[in-house]
Amino acid sequence: MKLFRCFFIMLLGSVAGASSPVVMAQSCNSKIATTSPTQRFHDNQDGSVTDQQTGLQWSRCSLGQYWEDNTCLDEPRALPYAIVALAVEEGWRLPSISELSSLVELRCSAPAINNKIFPATTPAAYWTATRFINRDGYFWQMHFLHGEGIPEKADSMAYVRWVRGK
């Protein structure tokens, strides 16, 4: 089943014309206190970490990447919301907007996340499971360029970080 999912995602990426993510250098302001310190996360030694503050277990890599040698390899895949449900790994799910926003590192941008814990995170929009109640067919995304939540149409493209627990 995993092989089918990987093939499906690769095929979708080529059919949809998904472009490679833009690589940017993270910028952090050391005068601002960290909001997601490294010591808050327990390394599960399997490509995931557990947030000791929230109890949630997070995939260290975005969908399309895999964990090897303490980093995320390969390219993340941006997908429309409806396709994300087909790519979910057993036991994992999309996070809510509040869960995903707990990973935002407010002192950093491009990406606004702890790069030690979540290396190779694309400074772009990531899907959440939270519907935007003011408009049908819209869901909240967390944009990791600056760490802000934005509502977007379900047919737009965004990246995925899986979570489990609670």
Image: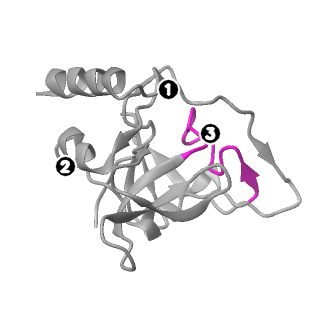
| Residue type marked 3 | Lys
Query: Which residue is disc 1 drawn over?
Result: 19
Of the pair 62 and 32, the residue shown nearer to us: 62
Model colouring: one colour
Q: Residues within 10 Å of mark 3 (few under 14, many from 20)?
A: few
Circle 1 — which element? loop
Whole-angstrom CA distance, mark 3 to mark 2, is: 25 Å
Looking at the image, tell me whether mark 3 or mark 2 is earlier in sequence order. Answer: 2
Disc 2 packing (10 Å; few <14; some 14–19; many ≥20): few
Residue 118 counted in the magenta span: yes
Residue 91 numbered tag: 2
Q: Earlier in the sequence, mark 3 or mark 1?
A: 1
Residue range (magenta):
107-124
Residue positioned 63% across, 58% down in the render: 147
Q: Is residue 73 magenta?
A: no
Q: Which residue is mark 3?
A: 116
Camera-side residue: 80 or 24?
Answer: 80
